[in-house]
Image (tube, rainbow, N blue to C red):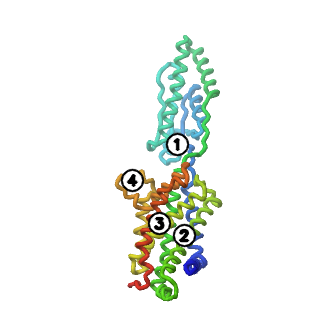
Amino acid sequence: MNSLFIAINMLRRTLFQKKGFLMYLVIPAAVVSLIIGVIGQQSDHGVDIAYINLDQGAMGSHLLQELSMLPDYRLKEEASDTALKEVITKQKVSSAFVIPEGFSETLMKGASAQIDMYQLNMNEASITLKINLDSILSRYQGAIELHSQQGLQGAALREAVEKTMYQMEKHQVKAKVTDFNLYVNPNMNTVIGFMLMFMMGLINNTVSVIMDDRRQRTMARTYSAPIHSYEIVLGNFIGSFLVGTLQVLVILLFTRYVTNYDYGLPFVPQFVILEFFLLASMGIASTVASMVKNASNMSVINSLVVTPTCMLGGCFWPISLMPDWMQKIANFVPQKWVIEAILRMASGQTLSQMWMHMGVLTLFGLILLGVGSVILRPGDAEVS
């Protein structure tokens, strides 16, 4: 019961004040929602393509019709080579191509036609465009060769090819692709990473309240009360944990039901994993605080701990992009385990399969909380 009173008192000193309510609940939820709005949503798969059609025959028009039927391409015609190169250099389009003059006549003669492509740098869009253009040209050349082998020439060949092109554009038999969105949003790694970074920073502020009690001798007076020492320790840790839990709840509820961000996994498993990370964050914050004798240095040391561990844990980029030796070091920071657990659950695994991740996070918390419990020693006064 005494521990509960101490925990409620910490809530009153942090969340139940105007400044604390804004700093611990409103601002984190707003900032994470802003991050989601900027980088968290699914990216648009549409590709802007600029073109110039100098062909006077029908083949150039047929080729453009084929490309326009592809769902990922948005074609934009330009008036001149200068305008085409300008939209490329200013990165208004991903790629561009020019259908040369005499394109249809070259194909009808059975020769290989060339389409000039423009790109500022090689990327996925330019490569797929090249593949699609080559595929369409190959079909056209195959149709012309087939009719030529039947003895057709001149106007008869042109008419037969035109009819074939017209039937090909109907696409009467085609594959239908249904996207069930079963893949993990590639931007969710960054969203979860920034959420964890804010959680760690806020937990550090909560632990600073305990340091203020030690500096102002409030903790020494608490230990002089007729209660057990373990109740004081438990009350402080429960209070910090409740503050962090309310932060997690507000952030998740706001981003899920106000911002409408789809994490790809149920609410409860994500909340449980973040609670285990909260325990580990409390351990890190208390361990750092136990090594600081002056509260004014707390923010500096926290920045030297939070930022590097977030970088190693994959909060800003996927761990797979880091060198092998850094990937091994990442196993010793809790951010790596919680991000991996959330991404796995978003891909279809259940919370019960995350027993190893929850166990590792629990070990982080218990070991570091044990080391950091020195901050609750009332005799360790702050030095200037």
Residue 272 horizontal/vertical position (percent): 55, 61
- Residue 19 shows in this picture: no
Vertical relation: 107 (above or below) 220: above
Q: Residues within 10 Å of mark 2 (few under 14, many from 20)?
A: many
- Check the image and report above or below for 102 versus 18: above
Residue 322 pos. (x, y %): 39, 53
In three-dimensional space, the C-alpha distance between marks 3 and 1, rounded to whole angstroms, equals 57 Å
Which tag is nearer the camera, tag 2 or tag 4?
2
Q: Look at the numbered discs 2 and 4 and tell me whether their residues touch, using CB distance below 8 Å.
A: no
Which mark's residue is nearer the viewer, 3 or 1? Answer: 3
Amino acid type, residue under disc 3 in the picture: Ala
- The first of marks 4 and 1 along the sequence is 1
**Mark linked to residue 83:** 1
Mark 2 and mark 4: Cα distance apart in space: 30 Å
Q: Which residue is mark 3?
A: 280
For the residues bearing labels 4 and 1, Cβ distance under 8 angstroms: no
Label 2 amino acid?
Gly
Above or below residue 223? Residue 197 is above
**How would you rate the neighbour count of disc 3 (Cα within 10 Å): few for under 14, some for 14-19, many for 20 or more?**
many
> Can see residue 269?
yes
Instruction: Locate residue 251 relative to residue 288 in the image: left or right.
Output: right
**What amino acid is labelled 4 in the image?**
Met
Q: Is residue 370 left or right of residue 136?
A: left
Q: CA distance from mark 4 to mark 1?
A: 41 Å
The disc, 2 or 3, on the residue closer to the chain's N-terminal end is 2
Q: Which residue is mark 4?
A: 322
Of label 3 and label 1, which has the lower sequence position?
1
Mark 2 and mark 3: span between their CA atoms? 11 Å
- Tag nearer the camera, 2 or 3: 3
Residue 354: x %, y % from top left: 51, 55
